[in-house]
Amino acid sequence: PALALCRFTDLPEGSPADDTDVIAEFERLRGLGQLYDDSAVGPCLAAPREWYHQVRGFDERLFGEDHDDFDIQRRARLSGLVEVWLHDRTALLHQWHWRRFDEPRTPEEQAEHERYRRHWERNRELVLASDDPVRNRDHEWGALPDGAEVIEPPERRR
């Protein structure tokens, strides 16, 4: 059992342009960006569905971005999953946008940045508070709402 992870290439501001054919220009765009460090793996966190059920999914106490991926990666290690890094065999391009951890440029961004820092600290405390890989024990977890259904992927042909 493994957790598949992939670092992503962070594209510079303004890239790609609205009229860019991303598929045709993928390699050029990839060359413009910088491979992000292994602390941001959120775009790719693939593990067996059974494992996600066993650990009761993402920790529902976490708020916002930045820690749900770190939490899943930490819990996978705690439960014995092997990490398999894929960025040498594939690529993810991350389109630039202002992120709440970036340096604020406006009063609105400053307010968002301050809120983000408070949530970041709270999330980090929650993630590091327990070495138990199972979360969401205090409530029903995994039940589908009325009228919802799971759509299974088609059988793979060999």
Image (cartoon, rainbow, N blue to C red):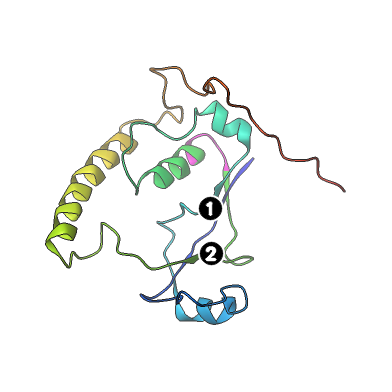
Residue 94, labelled with which disc?
none
Residue 1's image quarter? Answer: top right
Residue 17's image quarter? Answer: bottom left
> Vertical placement of 104 versus 46: above or below?
below
Magenta span of residues:
77-81
Q: Residue at x 60, y 60 (%)?
A: 86
Q: Amino acid at mark 2?
A: Leu
Residue 79 horizontal/vertical position (percent): 52, 34
The secondary structure that dominates the magenta segment is: loop
Residue 69: say if magenta. no
Q: Which residue is mark 2?
A: 92
Residue 94 horizontal/vertical position (percent): 45, 65
> Vertical placement of 75 versus 41: above or below?
above
Furthest toward the left, the residue is 107
Residue 146 horizontal/vertical position (percent): 54, 19
Q: Nearer the viewer, residue 103 or 84?
A: 103
Residue 37 horizontal/vertical position (percent): 41, 64
Q: Which residue is mark 1?
A: 44
Sequence order check: which comes first, mark 2 or mark 1? Answer: 1
Question: Does the CB distance between marks 2 and 1 fall below 8 Å?
Answer: yes
Q: Nearer the viewer, residue 63 or 137?
A: 63
Q: Residue at x 25, y 58 (%)?
A: 101
Q: Determine whether, in the image, residue 114 is placed left or right of residue 85.
A: left
Q: Residue at x 46, y 37 (%)?
A: 75
Distance of label 2 from label 1 (alpha carbons): 9 Å
